[in-house]
Image (cartoon, rainbow, N blue to C red):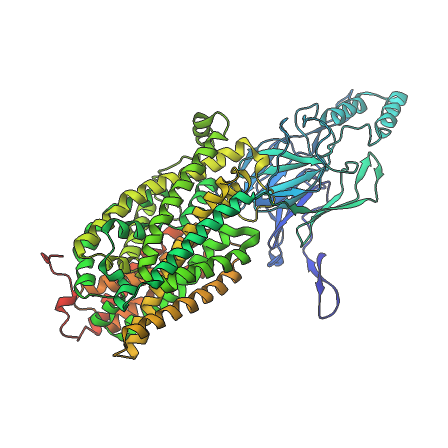
Amino acid sequence: MRGRREWDAALRRAVETPLPDFPCGVSLGSAAAKDNRVYVAGGSYAADLPSDVWTLDLEAPQRGWRPLPALPGPKGRSLPVAFVQNGDQKKTLLYVIGGYAKKAASSDKAAEAYTLSDGFAYDLQQPAASGRWRPISPAVVGGRRPEVGDQRSDLRPPASDLRPPASGAWPLLGARCVTVGDQHALVFGGPDAAAYDDNQRKMATLTGAAREAQRIAYLSVTPERNRWNRQALVYHTVTDRWFSLGEVPFPPTVVGAAIRRADGSVLLASGEVQPGVRTPVCAVGRFVQHRTFHWLNWVVMALYFGGLAGMGWWFMRKKKSADDYFKGGGRIPWWAAGVSIFAAMFSSISFLAVPALAYMSDWRYAPKSACIALIPPLVIGCYLPFFRKLKLTCAYEYLELRFNLACRLFASLAFNLFMVAYLPALAVAAATGADVNACIVVVSLLTILYCAFGGIEAVIWSDVVQTVVLFGGALLILVLLISGTDSGVAGAVQTAGLANKLKLLDFALDPSRPVIWVVLLSGYVECLISYTSDQCVIQRYMTTKNAKEAGRGLWLTVPLSLVATVVFFSIGTALYTFYRSQPERLAVTMPKADSILPTFIANDLPMGVAGLVLAGLFAATITTLAANLNSSATSITNDFFVRLRKGTEDRAQVRFAQACTVAVRLAGMAGALMLANMDIRAVYDQFLKFIGILTSGLACLFMLGIFTRRVGAAAALAGLAANYVVCIGLDRAELAWKPHLLLYGAIGIVTCLVTALAVSAVFPNRKTGIEELMWRRGEKT
């Protein structure tokens, strides 16, 4: 038995936990680890085993070592580089690169070792029985000098052009490797393939004194004269490209140790500086943050935020009744209301997470946006009449009229607890990177300033301004990304096509993948949820002078959403082609894939332009925050304060709503500060899962109230509870197979609907006077 050692703080000593033996003796292999799994790849085995790649689950060591599919190529791959890192298509992969193998001995020739420069990647989510390795690019570094932007190391620049070794690619034989950031691996050391192979050929054919002379000559090559790798090589897993950070300030080594420490620095320990000679030298490398944000960018940002604060102050000075604060007095033009609805729905989540999704995967999520064209006829014909006829300030007033107070308060509480605090926090955490805490505080305070005192009117008009900035910044980014890609537009299309980044439609029937029917169903359900039960949207329906104007505003969101989808998915694809053309420009310590667009903005936009685009980025974030804040204040004031303290004057309602805005934003800021330090890999997937699980039940409540007479309060609440039990349970359960996260919304609505109808058969609705609260064919808006 062998074991693992862990430090026991209570006992103040290392404790060893027994682990099962490896299937047989192995030497010269490589190991990698991810979470609680250990992987051993390659090496020379003492027995004939079915595979040369094995894994052990440290949480269930009793299951023993299990084989993965064998590595392609020659058997006995020794001293390769192995690591686990996030890769393309949102996958986590095991990489095995380089090393050496041996040719069998013959009658006139001894066994000859030769270097291997090929590499392979294995998707760890594949079933072991049918998994396959795919080839990756060999370690060839081009002649372009690195121009590292945001994150730099203390490595010195190369003394000469970054020419590859004589053989064309580094074999990485015995090299040291450590993963950094979300999608990079650093490789240090390793011999030159041509020199190694030449020595091995001579040693296999020479005999006697000539062979001994060759051995001595090879061992005598000093570090100053050998052609070993002196560069810190970097492999970018998403674009499958290699580049160099520069030369290490000490002799290169092989078969040493490399560790990424808790503070992010890299420790290199010992190793051979020439064959048979080990060094006691240990070195620590740190990545230092070098801010290159020009003062002009800060001026642009300051002017933008100053204008934002001024807008809030101007609206604060206007006399406001409760109707002004919550509905804008019905003075909002239809086009401004439509732009505001679009901005609230297509905000910082889209600005940051959609490009990151397309950069990591493809366009298969894009058809979701087409479903918005089906929403205006349904909303205008069936939902909008009730919201306008009843003169609702808060959407959830309808639920009390149709069902009871419990339904109203539960829906309002769910909206305020999750929509306001969690989603904007996800967006801010993905946008701000290392400065997340300071940015959250600044953005929160500025949002409070113009939202708390300006009301919905300030929110809507700032939405209009911010949408212009957002679209302008997005188009500028797209142009710069394509111009920075090799061969421009043609090169971007060709590169993206070869990498399968333009895949749009998948006609398979597998519900565990984002196939076309899953995407379209998800898109329709997502739009149905947002446009029929989201207080942010419904409140904007009430700001125009009549229902016809509100309907025109809703129709305006259709072309805006379709254009935005094309633009932001194009940005994601262009990010891939840009960094494939110039991989050295991407910060190796980028903490997560959702930081890809902010990283480009900070490092690669010209001075002044970066400030303008970041203004658009923060505009998108503040749009979401402000919309949710005002809607939250509206729902809390009307669902709790006014409901429980009838006869309250308008002035008191406005003051209470302003206080709610401040309190809710501070609570959301606290949540954002906690989430900022969590590992959030794919914000867009988290957002869609959140929408499906936690808000599909609210949409079903409105659907049940408007279209079914038999369902009463008891049945509606039972359906809502069943929705949460099924969806949350499905998400948390450890199952061998699950439907794709895009289907959670549809599953939630169906669960709520079926449960409510079933319960209503036993406990039917007994509330009278609800005829005016239900849809009737032919009723005019």
Q: Residue at x 26, y 62 (%)?
A: 327
Q: Looking at this view, name the residue that lies furthest to the right.
A: 209
Does residue 345 appear left or right of residue 606 in this picture? left
Does residue 683 appear left or right of residue 10 in this picture? left
Instruction: State the residue in front, 184 or 469.
Output: 469
Image quadrant occupied by the C terminus: bottom left
Instruction: State the residue in front, 614 or 280.
Output: 614
In which quadrant of the rendered view does residue 273 lie?
A: top right
Is residue 429 at all visible to an observer of this figure?
yes
In which quadrant of the rendered view does residue 285 lie?
A: top right
Q: How many marks are shown on the rendered structure?
A: 0
Give the percent coordinates (x, y) of residue 677.
55, 58
Give the percent coordinates (x, y) of residue 220.
87, 29
Q: Residue at x 37, y 64 (%)?
A: 453
Q: Residue at x 42, y 59 (%)?
A: 447
Give the percent coordinates (x, y) of residue 103.
71, 27
Is residue 639 at all visible to an observer of this figure?
no
Q: Is residue 202 above or below residue 333?
A: above
